[in-house]
Amino acid sequence: MTTSKEFFEVPKRYKNWSYGLIGIGILALLVGYFMYGASDDIHHKSRFWATLLQNSTYFLLTTNAAMFFICATILAFGGWQMVFRRVPEAISAAVPVIGVITLVILLAIVFGGHHMTHIYHWTDHETVANDKILEGKSPFLNIPFYIIWTVLIIGLWSLLGFKVRKISLEADKPMSVEQGKKYIWKNTVWASLYIVWFALTVMSTTPWLWLMSIDAHWYSTMYSWYTFASTWVSGLALITLFVIYLKNAGYLEYTNKEHLHDLGKFMFAFSIFWAYLWFSQFMLIWYANIPEETVYFNPRIKDGAYSGVFWFNFIINFLAPFLIFMKRNSKRNYTTVTIMSLIIVFGHWLDFYQMVMASVAPDHVEMNLFDFGIALGFVGIIMLVTGRALSKYPLVSKYHPFQKESIIHHT
Amino acid sequence: MALKKFVVGVFDDEHNLFNAVRKVRKSGYRLHEVYTPFPLHGLDREMGLRDTSIHTAGFIYGLTGTSLAFGFMTWIFTKDWPLNIGGKPHFALPAWIPIMFEFTVLLSAVGMVLTFCYVCQLAPFVKKHHFHLRSTDDKFVMVLDVSSGNSESEASDFLSGLGASEVNVQVAETGWWLGTYDREQKLGLSREPSH
């Protein structure tokens, strides 16, 4: 192993790209603010904040999925991912940064209240007082709880993620068998804590509070799982993209097609899982045909304004990965996997778009450069933070007990 | 069903076996089959076996399942016996998708199992010749086909040169038959060590 390839040196082009993308994001934010945010029209204001809400939550949950990947594989005693485990670790380093941005946006929307945006109806006391359904939900859907819980969500993701990353660094020093056993146990304990918190947040309360409460009258028991599936598969695609980038740049010498194959399998499987939830959510509502529930699908299917987005979303997030990733060779081909990963990241961004926008502005789709600019800004932040985190520590934790298992991994 | 002549080499560990497979293929002997007590990663590649096609078969079975379920339900509910179920349209596609999915899984799973059994000639009462009974326990057994071309003694020498702990020559049935194994073979007495 040559020392020069043990550490990732952030190339100048990479840096310029990430700064450039962040620049585009800031520019889009400013232009968007003057076009929509500062307007007197409440629909414009809602659209401005809804775009920020969509992008920040999507990219926060996606980067956080990288830490879920690590903790889930720790708990499953998985060894195969060890040769590239520093990559998801580095991606999860973006959670605190994007978390703070998300927190600011969410607080602004909640405190801005009914006069600033039409996003969270339940923040308005008058509306709640005259609305039996919202009143019934108010023990959960209220401003203090929302704020405390949101701060806890983002804070604990960041803290537990930080702890798991720190433990990972201990595997850069040689350890005996006894130490190795203790080390695995320590990993297991912290990973379980993270997973428990993950279950209480991403798999349940987070999507309810942040996204489902846009349609405060409506609810779906599938919603959190659906959101989780969406961000989990795009998190996997993000990990894959960084792994392939580093591999192309000559790093990660032990990572090979076997590992790529398994990442491809993961994306294949969870694209199907996403489609399963997508369909389950729809079918239960279609079958029961209760007006309170079907209202969610009115703008989304049939004659709704978002039906194009909705079905396109289904094609690129399910049909494309399902048919293309089915073949063994396409999961082992770097080009195919790269293209599919890009499609998946974009596709689930679009999924979040229709989840948020079709509820905030159900009458027409108004997707323009503002949305893409904000998204690119977040991509820039992820690139910058991940690149920095990658360059700080060795790319491979040489003395991890499972290291050898990962090197000789065979699919 | 033809009788053929085989040279059987028994190896004690998989490292010797891998090495031997490589050498045997290079030297041009006809590799009939390799029997191992557990699956060995990469052995199929060393033996030069092509990738399995069972997934293609599975895909076709699955597609058959989807279209059968879809076609049958369409025929029943729109042509043969239309019923008003909860005011839903007769062509109630969302309600059929779970059934189409289940039928896809059923046909592809069952189809693949049956195909696998057919390809491996596995069925109740079907018997095949065992070259070495301990290949199911702790021995790695390589079988060379010497019915044409290579002389058996030459092949035997070659195998023991590669580290086989035991080499013997067997004349055996290549296909399968119905019935039982004879007692002799069960005890492994028909094998005569050539060294």
Image: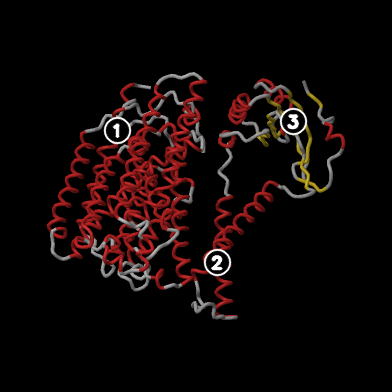
Foreground tag (3 vs 1): 1
Q: Residue furthest front?
A: A129
Q: Quadrant of residue A331?
A: top left
Q: Chain of mark 3?
A: B
Q: Nearer the viewer, residue B40 or A279?
A: A279
Q: CA distance from mark 3 to mark 1?
A: 54 Å
- Residue drawn at x 72%, y 47% is B122
Left or right: A330 in relation to B33: left
What amino acid is labelled 2 in the image?
A: Ser
Residue B179: percent from left, percent from top: 84, 47
Percent across and percent down for residue A290 are: 44, 72
Residue at left offset 57%, top offset 49%: B53
Residue at image mark 3? B134
Which one is in front in this view, the residue at disc 2 or the one at disc 1?
A: 1
Helix, strand or loop for disc 3:
helix
Same-chain check, marks 3 and 1: no
Q: Are marks 2 and 1 on the same chain?
A: no
Q: Position of residue B69 (x, y in %)?
A: 57, 67
